[in-house]
Amino acid sequence: MPAEELFREDAYLKSCRSTVTRVDDRTLCVEQTVFYPLGGGQPGDTGTLAWEGGSARITDTRYCEDGDIGHILDAQSAMPPVGTPVELAIDWDRRYRHMRMHTAMHLLGSILRYDVTGGNISTEKSRLDFNMEDTVDKAAVASALADLVEADHPVSCRWITEAELDAQPELVRTMSVQPPRGKGSVRLLEIAGVDLQPCGGTHVRSTSEVGAVRIGKVEKKGRQNRRVNIHLDD
Ligand SMILES: [Zn+2]
């Protein structure tokens, strides 16, 4: 059984107790975890692992080939054996910035309604690539982004089955990105009145928590690609 992904239901969980289910070289798997694995442009979480008589740094989190969540331990630390009860704690300040950035990316995508072709999130600077030829009016985008943060729109996630999606074509039409098919159910991220799309990442609860976000350089990466950089200034 792959780890239960506690961060999907509550992105604000900072730690959890669990049990080691697998150890493979420097990679450790557990029954349940608060660690987000690299995906969707959002970096994997870092943090600490503690057990009776030991502790270790978790330097990255990645999906294993079989879909389980691999916690990568630093090269010096001991590896607790399968069956060990452990406590996992994420580096919360880092993750919270990823949550703010990730939510800001959705806001940016709701302002620039073009296809997104790529993106990357980090604690200080993130970027989103748009399939567009037009020039980006930086001042207008910055102003619209500030308004969305200020308006404090609630942010929520829910799961929806493919059968429910099929029964609500109008819902699918309102999505800025079309949901993937074939997995049975889809996780939807909704920023009330602003954005609705499939997303598996971690987000803040309301747009005001995005805080001091600033539009950085807008780069022309080819004829049909505009890269918009954003920064967190605090
Ligand atoms: Zn998202």
Image: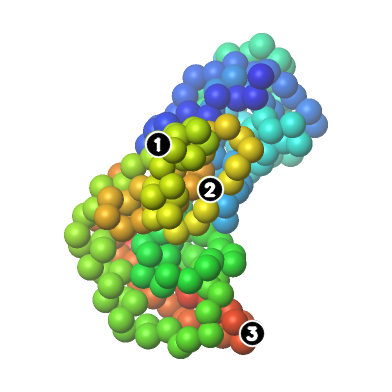
**Residue 33 horizontal/vertical position (percent):** 54, 28
Q: What element carries label 3?
A: loop
Whole-number angstrom distance, CA of label 3 to CA of label 2: 28 Å
- In this view, the mark in front (3 or 1): 1
Q: Where is residue 205 in the image (x, y as percent from the top left)?
A: 30, 44
Kind of residue at badge 1: Arg
- Residue located at (64% from left, 84% from top): 222
The type of residue carrying mark 3 is Gly
Q: Residue, x 30% and y 65% (percent of image)?
A: 212
Q: Sequence-wise, which precedes: disc 3 or disc 2? A: 2
| Left-right relation of 180 to 97 | right
Dot in front, 2 or 1: 2
Measured Cα–Cα span from mark 3 to mark 1: 36 Å
Neighbours of disc 2 within 10 Å: few (<14), some (14-19), many (20+): some
Seen from the viewer's position, the closer of residues 227 and 230 is: 227
How far apart are the alpha carbons under marks 2 and 1? 13 Å
Against 77, is 17 above or below?
Answer: above
Q: Quadrant of the C terminus?
A: bottom left
Residue in front for this viewpoint, 175 or 110: 175
In which quadrant of the rendered image does the N terminus lie? Answer: top right
Residue placed under numbered mark 3 in the picture: 222
Q: Confirm or deny contact between disc 2 and disc 1 (CB under 8 A).
A: no
Q: Is residue 34 above or below residue 97?
A: above
Which disc is residue 158 wearing? 1
Mark 3 or 2: in front is 2
**In the picture shown, does residue 176 fall above or below 69?**
below
Q: Earlier in the sequence, mark 2 or mark 1?
A: 1
Residue underneath mark 2: 179
Q: Looking at the image, which residue is at 27% across and 76% down?
A: 143
**Label 2: which secondary element:** loop
